[in-house]
Image (cartoon, grey):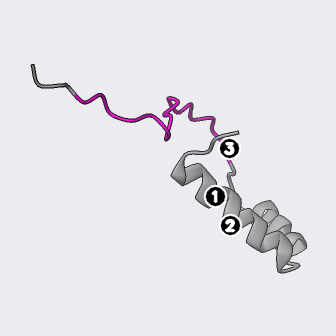
Amino acid sequence: MRWGKARAEAVLHLRCVLLNGLWADFESYLARRDRLRLVSKPVPTVTHDAKPQVKMAA
């Protein structure tokens, strides 16, 4: 699975919350918010292993 930098950052934040034992506090925080909208934002796929094409001199 590949992640864009922004989404990988969000997953790392959630992992930190979990590993620090703060998941219940995080859930409470989300429950107290007036409006919580998780909006899907499709992101075009970008391969990070692709190398730019180099034109050879004739």
Is the residue marked by circle 3 packed among few (<14), some (14-19), or many (20+) residues within 10 Å? few
Q: Amino acid at mark 3?
A: Leu
| Observer able to see residue 54 | yes
Q: Residue at x 67, y 45 (%)?
A: 37
Q: Are marks 1 and 3 in contact (CB under 8 Å)?
A: no
Extreme residue in the left direction: 58
Q: Is residue 29 above or below residue 45?
A: below
Residue at 86% over, 70% down: 23
User: What residue range appears in magenta?
Assistant: 37-54
> Horizontal placement of 10 versus 23: left or right?
left
Residue designated by label 3: 38
The residue type indicated by label 2 comes to His
- Would residue 29 be seen by someone viewing this image from the given angle? no
How far is mark 2 from mark 1, CA to CA? 5 Å
Measured as percent of width and height from the top left, residue 53 is found at 30, 28
Q: Residue furthest top?
A: 58
Q: Which residue is mark 1?
A: 10
Q: Name the spot of residue 33 as percent of width and height, x first.
A: 71, 62
Give the camera-side residue of 48 and 40.
48
Describe residue 57's horizontal placement relative to residue 30 as left or right.
left
**Is residue 46 one of those drawn in magenta?**
yes
In what quadrant of the picture does the C terminus appear? top left
* Cβ atoms under marks 3 and 2 closer than 8 Å: no
Does dot 3 land on a helix, a strand or a loop?
loop
Q: Is residue 2 left or right of residue 44?
A: right
Evaluate if marks 2 and 1 touch, with contact meaning CB atoms under 8 Å apart.
Answer: yes
Identified at 81% across, 61% down, the residue is 31
| Amino acid type, mark 1 | Ala
Viewer-nearest of labels 1 and 3? 1
Say which element carries label 2: helix
Q: Which residue is mark 2?
A: 13
- Which sits earlier in the primary sequence, circle 3 or circle 2? 2
